[in-house]
Structures are given as C-alpha cells and as structure tokens.
Amino acid sequence: MGAIDQEFRRRGFTFRTLCVMALVVCAGCSPQDPELTASNNTDSDAPAPAARETAALYQRTCFSCHSTGINGAPRTGDQQAWATRMDKGMEVLVRNARDGYQAMPPRGLCFDCSDEEYGALIRLMAESAN
Ligand code: HEC
C-alpha cells in the first residue's frame, strides 16, 4: 500500500479523494479487486480468447516460416497462395501440417497442437488480410 499512498500524494488531494470514494463504492458492489474485474471484462471489442490464443500460438510456431514464405511456404494473408491449398480440403491440410508435406516439416514447430488447433492456425493464415 506504501507505493499507492505515494502515488496519491504525488497526484494531489482531489485525485486521492476521488479514488477513496471509488474504492468505497466498489467495495460494496464487488468482492473482487476492481482492477482484476476490469481486466477480466469480456464485453469489450477485444478478440475472443480463443482467437487470441490462436494468434499467440501462431507467433510461436507457423509464423517463423509462413510470415515470410521460407522455402515456398504459402504466406500468411496471401489469400491467392492459400486458395490452391484450401482446395485440398481442411482435412488434408490438417493432416499435412501434422505429418509434414514436402518442404513443410511435420508439426510445424507445434509439437502439442491438436487437429483443431492446426485447423484454426491454417484458417488464420489463409483468411487473415495482409
Ligand atoms: C520450418 C518452416 C515451417 C514452419 C515452422 C511451418 N511451416 Fe507450414 N509450410 C512450410 C513450407 C515450406 C510449406 C510449403 C510446402 C510445399 O508445398 O512444398 C508449408 C506448407 C504448409 C501447408 C500447406 C500444405 C499443403 O498440403 O499444401 C499447411 C497447411 C501448413 N504449412 C501449415 C502449417 C502450420 C499450421 C504451421 C504451424 C503449426 C506451419 N505450417 C509451420 C514451412 C513451414
């Protein structure tokens, strides 16, 4: 609490009064820390948690080749390059991501991805605008 008190003092009395009032009001309506409640808020415009997880997973795995198109990898957001791949059907693409396909190494750096996750990653790469 020491740091917060210092912060209050630095910003002056009016702000401090407001904060104290806000804390008192919030204490009555929620048993949680108000800051925690705010960051868990799901009613915002932020992407859904699943989409965000897929994006983070992509950054750790497929990104290293599919962002630049190393060795002829279809580039993320290059909808034309992906269209010919997508024509094979999602089932085939998921299998090829998992088992490898020509220059595409098996599992594409995601060693614990499920088929659903491969599907989500492939959709992200094929459908995202560049
Ligand atoms: C080490 C580089 C590398 C990584 C990492 C990588 N890829 Fe690839 N990927 C490639 C290359 C190269 C190709 C093109 C293969 C070809 O057509 O010869 C490819 C092609 C593909 C294809 C098309 C396969 C087909 O049947 O046409 C899919 C689907 C794919 N990758 C999914 C993924 C996914 C999902 C990830 C992340 C989990 C990933 N890749 C990570 C290099 C990579």
Image (spheres, grey):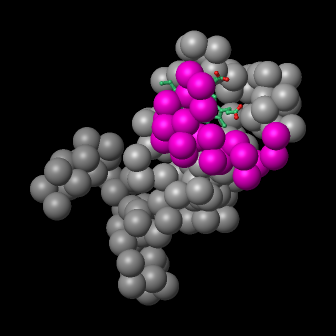
- Find the residue positioned furthest to the left: 2
Q: Is residue 21 left or right of residue 81?
A: left
Q: Quadrant of the N terminus?
A: bottom left
Task: Judge whether residue 53 is colored magenta.
Answer: no
Say if 45 sits above or below 110 in the image: below
- Where is residue 15? Give x, y as percent: 39, 53
Q: Is residue 39 left or right of residue 2?
A: right
Span of residues in magenta = 88-108
Image quadrant of ligand 1 equals top right
Which residue lies at the image location 57% right of the left edge and 13% below the top edge?
Answer: 71
Tell me if residue 67 can be seen.
no
- Where is residue 5? Give x, y as percent: 20, 55
Say if 27 sits above or below 36 in the image: below
Which residue lies at the image location 78% right of the left edge and 32% below the top edge?
Answer: 85
In the image shown, does 48 or 106 lie closer to the viewer? Answer: 106
Instruction: State whether the magenta stretch is mostly helix, strand or loop.
Output: helix
- Where is residue 94? Give x, y as percent: 65, 47
Which residue lies at the image location 59% right of the left edge and 40% below the top edge?
Answer: 97
Q: Is residue 78 left or right of residue 68?
A: right
Q: Is residue 11 left or right of residue 117?
A: left
In the image shown, does 12 or 104 lie closer to the viewer? Answer: 104
- Where is residue 106? Give x, y as percent: 49, 37
In the image shown, does 30 or 23 lie closer to the viewer? Answer: 30
Task: Judge whether residue 97 is colored magenta.
Answer: yes
Which residue lies at the image location 35% right of the left edge and 67% below the top edge?
Answer: 20
- Residue 2 lies in quadrant: bottom left
Tell me if residue 10 can be seen.
yes
